[in-house]
Amino acid sequence: MAQENSKPTVLIVDDEEMVVTSIRAFLKLDTDYEVRGFTDPEEAVRYLESCLADVVIADYVMPRMNGIQFLTRAKQLQPEATRVLLTGYADKQSAIQAINELSLFQYLEKPWDNAALLLVIQGGVERSQLFRQLREKIAELDAAHSNVQEIQRRLFRAFM
Amino acid sequence: MAEDRAQAGFRDEAVDLDAELETANRKLAEAYRMASLGRLIAGIAHEISTPVGSILSNNAVLRRSLDRLREALADTSGAGAARLSEALEVLETLRSLAAVDKIACERISAVVVGLKTFARVEEKEFSKVSLNDLLRSTLVLTHAEYRSRIALETDFGDLPEVECYPQALSQVFLNLLVNAAQSIDGRGTVKVQTRREGEAVRISISDTGSGIRPEDRPRMLQPGFTTKPVGVGTGLGLSISREIVVDRHGGSIDFESELGVGTTFHIRIPVRQGGKATG
């Protein structure tokens, strides 16, 4: 899976163009993150099939595929990415239920507060990068461990 | 003599009762109007909160960007070209955010217009309005409800201005639009079409919902009749709509329906009301 560059990537999905534009402008000002905005969740799913994202943010109420359905797909495609749901006051209950099912990192109520959003995203980036590093280290350890075992076997045979 | 007095007495009482009934009817219609608006409140709040969220966020970005811009422009350290390109980039971002703010404010305005149309005090006189515009305002109020699962198609024909009570008609449109949405289980489509038909205007609202059972059809427009579960339907919406369209505007309301396919309601309103308000 390709990472477009070494900058952390934030994916935003909201059927309202104005929300995507506003969040993207805000993140551009305050962070160095690569921001990918989508108004069509299907398109966002296709993006996730081939490109890494660190944080995935979705609005709950969307036509055709709602935020929870989208984040479920996101979890299947990239389980290490951090998932965030944007909800209106009326959908808070559904969001809370999703926290467990989806291992949602956070949900944020709309209208969102920029400072709160930033904190969540920064935390989310840190979290997903830690998970990735952990997985890589474990793989390295496993490889090293297999090497050691192989060497042990050879030594043993040599002395038999 | 005594009989005449008795008859006069009965007549007076009848007139009084009639007046009371009319007042009660008006109060009921008013209560129904408030109830239907109340049901939409959550959706309307959401409709406003989205553009407001954008405007607030953009405003914060604007203030910080202006600081950056000032720094870039005041930099006399000689890093000219880099600062200039930074300043230009900031300006570009601000321009696109200003465009977003305009759209956001227009969205909020549209909600306000929709609410004002609905909230007008009881109309005593006819107004000449574009029914297409009236429908558009009403659709703003239902937008949030529809957005998540119902595709809306509009087919607005060329219409003359119609003499009517706009607030009352918007109530009728709202009633039909809400019914259409409620008849659809899960996802579906609602189509709104307007056409001029001679000296009248036809508004048709179709849905891809469950349809109306043949045995229910004769009673659809009667007060108190509802096919909706308790707490959802009052059985008043269509009968009040009928009263508004037929009694107050001299128009007609009818429908076609097919089980499992959907329902279409047609409202016809005469373009001219013959000069006198029927109150």
Image (tube, coloured by chain):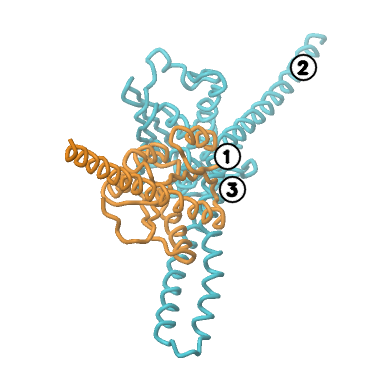
Chain colours: A orange, B cyan
**Residue wearing tag 1:** B41
Could one spot residue B261 in this view of the protein? yes
**Label 2 and label 3 in one chain:** yes
Q: Nearer the viewer, mark 1 or mark 2?
A: 1
Q: Earlier in the sequence, mark 3 or mark 1?
A: 1
Q: Earlier in the sequence, mark 2 or mark 3?
A: 2
Foreground residue, B158 or A51? A51
Res B116 label: 3
**Residue at horizontal 44%, vertical 41%?**
A61
Res B132 label: none
Label 2 crowd (10 A; few <14 / some 14-19 / many >=20): few
Q: Amino acid at mark 2?
A: Ala
Foreground residue, B119 or A64? A64
Q: Nearer the viewer, mark 3 or mark 1?
A: 1
Specify the quadrant of the image occupied by residue A143. Answer: top left
Q: Mark 2 near mark 3, Cβ–Cβ under 8 Å? A: no
**Residue wearing tag 2:** B8
In the rendered image, residue B229, in percent from the top left (x then y), is placed at: 51, 19
In the rendered image, residue A128, in percent from the top left (x then y), is placed at: 41, 49
Q: Nearer the viewer, mark 2 or mark 3?
A: 3
